[in-house]
Amino acid sequence: MRRLFVLCFTLCCLIQLKGQVNVSSLKVDNLSDAQIEQYVKQAELMGYSDAQLPDFARAQGISATEVKKLQDRLQRIKKNKQSESQVSAKSNNSQGSGRQVLGDPSARGRNRFLSEVDSLRFMQDSLLAVGKPKVFGADLFKNNAITFEPNLRMATPSSYVIGPDDELLLDITGDNEVSYKLPVSPEGNIKVEYVGVINVSGLSISAARSKISQRLSSVYGAINSGRTKVDVNIGNIRSIRVTLTGAVTKPGTYTLPSLATVFNALYASGGPAENGSYRDVQVIRNNHVVSRIDIYDFLVNGLQKGNIRLQDQDVIHIPVYANRVQFEGEVKRPAIFEIVKGESLQDVLNYAGGFGENAYSAKIKVFQKTDRERKISDIYADQFADYEPKNGDNFLAEELLDRYENRVSILGAVFRPGVYGLENGMTLRELLEKAQGVREDAFMERGLINRLAADNTLQLVNFNVRAVLDGKVADIILMREDKISISSIFDLRDEYKFIVQGQVRRPGEFPYAVNATLGDVIQKAGGLTEEAKNARIEIARRIRNRDAQDTVSSNIILVNIRNGKLEDSSIVLKPYDVVSVLGDANYRVQRQVKIEGEVLYPGIYTINREDERISDVITRAGGLTAYAYTEGASLRRTGTSKLKAEIKKEKELRKTELGSEAAVHGFDEEDDALNIGGNRATKQALSKVSQSAAVEAVVAEPSDLVGIELHKVLAKPYQREDLLLLDGDIITVPKELQTVRVVGEVLNPNNVVYVKGKSLSYYVNQAGGFTSEALKKKVFVQYANGAVKGRSGNYPEVKPGAEIVVPKRAPREKLNAQGWIGLGTGVASLAAIIVSLLR
């Protein structure tokens, strides 16, 4: 019973709140992120999840467009928030504190319900306060870019009324030349030499000029004949005091220049207040209204009717407004507008700038207030000029429907696909004629019409394109939103193409062409390379309707090439043929190797025999020098591309001095000697990363060094150690090396001077010893010739130029509490099994 009462009370409160606040006019773009979050929190309090938020908004009367905007804004806000775990933690804390305060369950439910109702009322009030349009013209007198300051440097207006504290400039020119600066006394008099006192108070400039000229004519006779001219202007103007009363932002008395107008005074006072009228600003002079100003004339048309020049002791009175209406929706200037008697809805629409581009202009909704309740009315376009708005009316210009009343579209294999206007009784054949007919590649056996039924379900209507165009079947009457699709024959099959690969200049895929021959395709591929001048071509062709028991998967056609000419270039190719241009096994390009270091003639040599070996090229290089260290000689099998890169790099190195190069890379002389010994790849890695990272690079990446023993090769040439040379090989014969490099998991990785007979442990100790992360059983030695030897019982022998690498132990995963529990459970189970077996 209590739940039923609470539910009924909730429903009544919500209905009352909804009746008091018009949420349908909510504009999401006018809301801040904090207000969006507040709205979501209120939805959660009412039992709505994030997925149900659109239902909550629609239930409050918010339009579908604004609901979509609300969802988009909420997604953007979520991206800028902290992780979900932090949000969940904060939510749990706030719920826990709430449970401590509320007390017993019944009080907890009552307080929660009342807080929801109060929060909902506060939320709706705040949302409407932000979404409520501003009063039209409210920013005019608060805009710093429009100051309405009087121009004090302009020519004196002839209608300017002279008063005390003004300064007159009297200029007499012609037969007589003289000028005077004459201040106006508090009594309104000026004193002119030879003439005396002249009263000018209350006179305009033109009247004062006539009076002064008449008095001066008794002294200067040439004034009457016109040979002498008299000119009167204002020098320093006086100040006047003007009082602003009524609904003014800052009422009071203001001191202004005597050239100031009504708009100058309004700007100085901040203009009409929130309830002030913009349509009836009154200027009172000597207890009479001398001017009425409608500010809308200036706001809408730029006219300043009634903006008279003020006089001392004038009073500007702004009454409170009489009638205001609100115009929202799809108008160019949504705002609150003040209306006067005799104005119509059309006038209000003009003040709002007219309809927007997406407005439904056939009618306007008006939300009115009666003596007892609210009501909604529709005002149609022919009633705009006759409808007289009432105070508090809220006009809404709605959006156009996102649909077309006469749209059809045609896509696919027609000459002019696109959207067309549906005329009364238009048929499919007529639409095809408007689209300039079907293309040559059109599939004529079937076309499709995607049609919406009366309940907006999708229907498919198929037709024979050829029969419709020939008139052999009844034409089809088109309907609104029909989408006609005519496929191309190319859209209904795989793309036909050729594949050319092998010894051609531009291998790749080529589009299929009818009657294309083998010679045509070879020409499209750029022709044959030099290697294919005496070779053959293999054409692989698909087998259609292949028998399942047949072991042949494709037909092979062979064509020989002799002296660059095909024996049969007229073979017509079929779709999906694969043309493989094979090479000549006897064709050879020049292959080169490089020898560097301690030989008499280092450089690049061309291999001149298929069986040329290391010993042969050493002999061609003049043999070894007296300083050659054969045990440190190495062979790098780089390939042609790497050899070319090595040659290019060597040319660049010649441009710089060896000293500056060593300074750039941080190598000393011993390092450079080690580099020559064959560990250049390792040195480059060490110049970019730390020592431990270099160890990982050495372990992970394959090396291009081949371990050779040059002293054995030269002692017994043409044996197993005397390798055949390949294109791109680099042979390095260093000087005798005097250091051993220690890297990896040691305390101080460095170069250690080689001492004959010392073990690996000696060099590790010279580098500070192993670290706690060292994997001692996997220590290995890389010798200067590229050979690598790991630990097999004892540590491997260390030779000059060698590099000792100490790998890092893999990180051990610590057991957490769950792991320890699982381990204990396993041990206990094992113990129980053993006990049971013993029993």
Image (tube, rainbow, N blue to C red):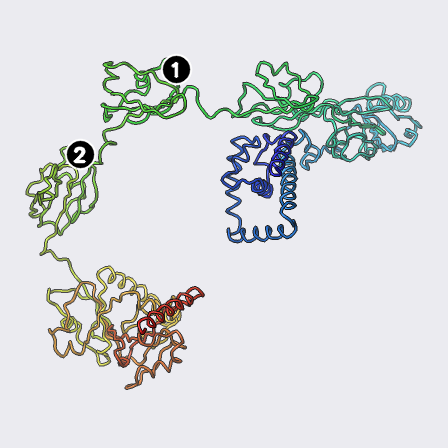
Secondary structure found at label 1: loop
Q: 235 or 173: which is nearer to us? A: 235
Q: CA distance from mark 1 to mark 2?
A: 43 Å
What residue is shown at x 15% (from left), y 32% (from top)? 514
Farthest residue to the bottom: give it. 757
Q: Amino acid at mark 1?
A: Glu
In the displayed structure image, the side of residue 771 where residue 302 appears, left or right? right
| Residue 633 visible in the current orientation | yes
Foreground disc of the pair 1, 2: 1
Q: 680 or 330: which is nearer to us? A: 330
What residue is shown at x 84% (from left), y 18% (from top)? 225
Give residue 773's position: percent from left, percent from top.
39, 73
Answer with the quarter of the image where residue 450 lies: top left
Q: 347 or 391: which is nearer to us? A: 391
The residue beneath circle 1 is 423
Looking at the picture, does residue 454 appear above or below residue 680? above
Q: Amino acid at mark 2?
A: Ala
Q: Quadrant location of the N terminus?
A: top right
| Residue 660 visible in the current orientation | no
Looking at the picture, does residue 608 appear above or below residue 428? below
Q: Residues within 10 Å of mark 2 (few under 14, many from 20)?
A: some
